């Protein structure tokens, strides 16, 4: 074969994206075709919590099994990423390193620095602490090498396995921290600094964040090195990415510096799938496992983020707002007399029991109550069968099967005969029919989830009519339909629900957040942070043409935050999909709006999106006041609802007209209140891009960022300006 023939063959070779999700019970791995997102194969192995290599062993095992069973060649892998529970487990179990703290200060501020950075024992979970040893270096004159070496030596002699360096106002000038950091690393010590983990003021919180980060370094680096060497040994040359707690991924070099960012990366993976694979615009993502359920929110196609906490203490990191509940597909039932008094929190898996759903038959079944694992209440229900090796139990998954709520292609589909027999047996004890018993189980399980969902809808001001409940995880069918029925909300069970988190890992975008505290930020300040965030993701391998940056300004805290995200390679997924006609798109928009297609108006379009609007009447004050608003839907060419608004305005214009159009919309629809002038949220549609400018505070800021986004485009290119108005 000639070199040119070899080159042609390689250029047409199928490219594969691999995602590996580390769950509490199993580690799932999936292979997706990079162009079509077809699932090429998926495998699972037990999560290796107890192995000396930690969860890294399970990651390696799942990768090896996936490559073999899906018949994927290492050269075909264009992207590989994994989530990890290593950081979270380390904190929950107290499996962390002893940390030495070197604080730097001088003059009158020295006392303040000592008080703020000498943390003692840092609580990370109930009765779990990071032990720290403190040393202070006076920098009144110069920071001399001897003082630094002396402090580092003393800390290592005290058994410190990692070092944190901290100084007041180092975010403005990190030179001193960097000098000590460099010397520590040159001595072969694991180290991190306050300015390396956060650029926000607040010495105590910044130091605490750095200490927690440092405490994870030994175990996380061992795990990362093992995983990376195994990936390379398998012949995969694609960069290894790790899931972050905010729903994106970072390269392994970034993880080696800030392992703290991998906390909660498991739940983040499912939400990444909801936005990237399912294209949910506004939704509540409900990921249901066997033991617990994770609930998170999505608005305008973005997962909603909050500030992080460890051990009840604030840290400078951003995580998805994920709320975990002790009810799921495998939750056991508690019965007192003729009444079901609870569903969960004990699960069949934790109790070492099987599901009635997944046995072929029952022989002489009987009911009994048990105390699982010799702890907790003794009124959990078990089914004893002569044909089963161990006791079985009825669960919400069994109830959903009996009530025909499990999709036919779902992993939770069970055997209806033993399920029916078991429910008839329990129903007889409760003086109910089997189906009435199943309905009661799902009602109790749903009621455990509903308060959290209602709270998230209220906190994030999400419109219930526009929100879709999206179920992921193997137990989704056991919980989500029942919740949707009681809340009277629309829902869907994700395709490939049991491996949806691994799919999310495979599709996650490279992400980085840069934040500063800037009083009255100028447009130059905003654009500088935007540039810095964009450069950071491109450095990790994001293609420049895919990079988007979302900006937020918090006027209360003066925090300016730029979050950049981009793909390792331009995704052709949407262009490979069947392109729908405008008539087909308007039907999708009409279904979303619960209206007839004839009632909708096509407002605008780009080469990738169609925007439809309709007039609706909003009722306020218990229906006493009514007003007409324009509601819109943005549909992509594959038929997904990508944006929606209950009250908004749409304007089609060219790039050259963008500034005037933005000014008109922001000024015309601005509101005035106690906080002053509030402009509507502005979003731009350009080609296949959604440019979200909703986090900016005034028209000047919106124009500055819009100009940067559009400056290299033809002046006559069509774009769409969307204004989302407050109700």
Image (cartoon, helix red, strand yellow):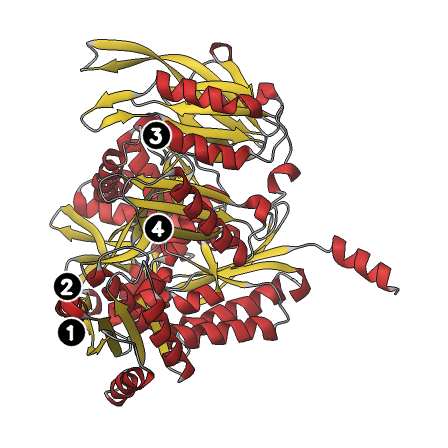
Looking at the image, residue 338 lies above or below residue 667: below
Quarter where residue 427 is shown: top left
Residue 515's label in the rendered image is 4
Instruction: Say which of 192 and 76 sits in front.
Output: 192
Quarter where residue 71 is shown: bottom right
How far is the residue under mark 1 from the one under mark 2? Answer: 35 Å
Name the residue located 53 percent from the left edge and 15 percent from the top edge. 602
Quadrant that contains the N terminus: bottom right
Residue at the disc numbered 1: 120
Name the residue located 28 percent from the left edge and 45 percent from the top edge. 424
Q: Are marks 1 and 2 in contact (CB under 8 Å)?
A: no
> Earlier along the polypeptide chain: callout 4 or callout 1?
1
How far is the residue under mark 3 from the one under mark 2? Answer: 56 Å
How far is the residue under mark 4 from the one under mark 2? Answer: 45 Å
Residue at the disc numbered 3: 698
Instruction: Say which of 3 and 575 sits in front.
Output: 3
């Amino acid at each position: 074969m000639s070199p040119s023939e070899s080159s042609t063959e390689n250029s047409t070779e199928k490219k594969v994206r691999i995602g590996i999700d580390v769950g509490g019970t199993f580690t799932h791995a999936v292979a997706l075709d990079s162009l079509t997102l077809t699932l090429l194969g998926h495998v699972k192995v037990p999560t290796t919590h107890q192995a000396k290599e930690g969860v890294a062993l399970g990651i390696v095992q799942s990768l090896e099994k996936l490559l073999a069973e899906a018949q994927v060649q290492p050269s075909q892998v264009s992207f590989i990423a994994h989530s990890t529970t290593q950081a979270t487990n380390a904190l929950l179990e107290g499996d962390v390193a002893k940390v030495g703290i070197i604080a730097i200060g001088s003059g009158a501020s020295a006392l303040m620095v000592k008080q703020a950075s000498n943390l003692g024992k840092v609580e990370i979970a109930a009765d779990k602490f990071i032990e720290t040893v403190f040393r202070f270096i006076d920098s009144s004159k110069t920071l001399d090498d001897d003082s630094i070496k002396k402090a580092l030596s003393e800390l290592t002699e005290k058994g410190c396995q990692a070092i944190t360096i901290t100084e007041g106002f180092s975010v403005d000038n990190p030179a001193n921290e960097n000098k000590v950091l460099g010397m520590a690393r040159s001595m072969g010590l694991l180290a991190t600094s306050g300015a390396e983990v956060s650029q926000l003021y607040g010495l105590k919180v910044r130091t605490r964040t750095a200490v927690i980060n440092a405490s994870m370094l030994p175990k996380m680096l061992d795990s990362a090195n093992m995983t990376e060497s195994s990936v390379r040994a398998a012949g995969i040359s694609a960069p290894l990415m790790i899931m972050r707690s905010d729903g994106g991924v970072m390269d392994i070099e970034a993880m080696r510096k800030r392992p703290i960012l991998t906390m909660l990366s498991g739940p983040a993976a499912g939400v990444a799938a909801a936005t990237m694979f399912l294209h949910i615009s506004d939704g509540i993502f409900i990921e249901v496992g066997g033991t617990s359920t994770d609930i998170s929110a999505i608005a305008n196609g973005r997962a909603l983020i909050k500030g992080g906490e460890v051990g009840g203490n604030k840290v400078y990191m951003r995580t998805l707002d994920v709320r975990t509940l002790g009810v799921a597909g495998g939750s056991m039932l508690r019965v007192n007399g003729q009444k079901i008094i609870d569903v969960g929190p004990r699960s069949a898996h934790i109790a070492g029991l099987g599901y009635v759903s997944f046995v072929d038959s029952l022989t002489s079944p009987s009911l009994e109550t048990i105390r699982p694992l010799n702890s907790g209440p003794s009124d959990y229900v078990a089914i004893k069968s002569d044909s089963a090796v161990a006791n079985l139990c009825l669960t919400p998954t069994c109830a959903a099967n009996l009530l025909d709520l499990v999709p036919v292609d779902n992993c939770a589909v069970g055997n209806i005969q033993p399920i029916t027999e078991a429910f008839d047996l329990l129903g007889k004890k409760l003086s109910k029919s089997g189906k009435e018993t199943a309905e009661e189980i799902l009602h109790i399980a749903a009621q455990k989830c509903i308060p959290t969902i209602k709270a998230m809808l209220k906190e994030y001001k999400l419109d219930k009519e526009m929100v879709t409940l999206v179920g992921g995880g193997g137990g989704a069918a056991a919980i989500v339909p029942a919740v949707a029925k009681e809340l009277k909300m629309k829902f869907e069970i994700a395709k490939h629900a049991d491996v949806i988190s691994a799919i999310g890992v495979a599709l996650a975008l490279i992400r980085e957040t840069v934040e500063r505290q800037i009083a009255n930020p100028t447009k130059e300040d905003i654009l500088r942070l935007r540039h810095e965030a964009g450069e950071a993701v491109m450095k990790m391998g994001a293609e420049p043409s895919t990079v988007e940056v979302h900006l937020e300004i918090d006027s209360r805290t003066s925090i300016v935050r730029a979050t950049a995200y981009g793909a390792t390679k331009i995704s052709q997924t949407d262009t490979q999909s069947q392109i729908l006609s405008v008539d087909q798109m308007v039907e999708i928009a009409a279904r979303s709006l619960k209206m007839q297609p004839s009632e909708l108006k096509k407002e605008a379009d780009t080469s990738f999106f169609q925007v439809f609007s309709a007039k609706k009447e909003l009722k306020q004050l218990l229906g006493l006041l009514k007003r007409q608003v324009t509601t819109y839907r943005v549909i992509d060419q594959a038929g997904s609802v990508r944006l929606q608004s209950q009250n908004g305005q749409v304007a089609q214009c060219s790039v050259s007209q963008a500034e005037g159009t933005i000014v008109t919309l922001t000024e015309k629809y601005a509101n005035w209140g106690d906080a002053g002038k509030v402009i509507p949220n502005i979003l731009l549609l350009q080609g296949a891009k959604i440019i979200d400018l909703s986090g900016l505070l005034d028209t000047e800021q919106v124009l500055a960022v819009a100009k940067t986004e559009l400056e290299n485009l033809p002046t006559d290119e069509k774009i769409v300006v969307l204004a989302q108005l407050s109700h």
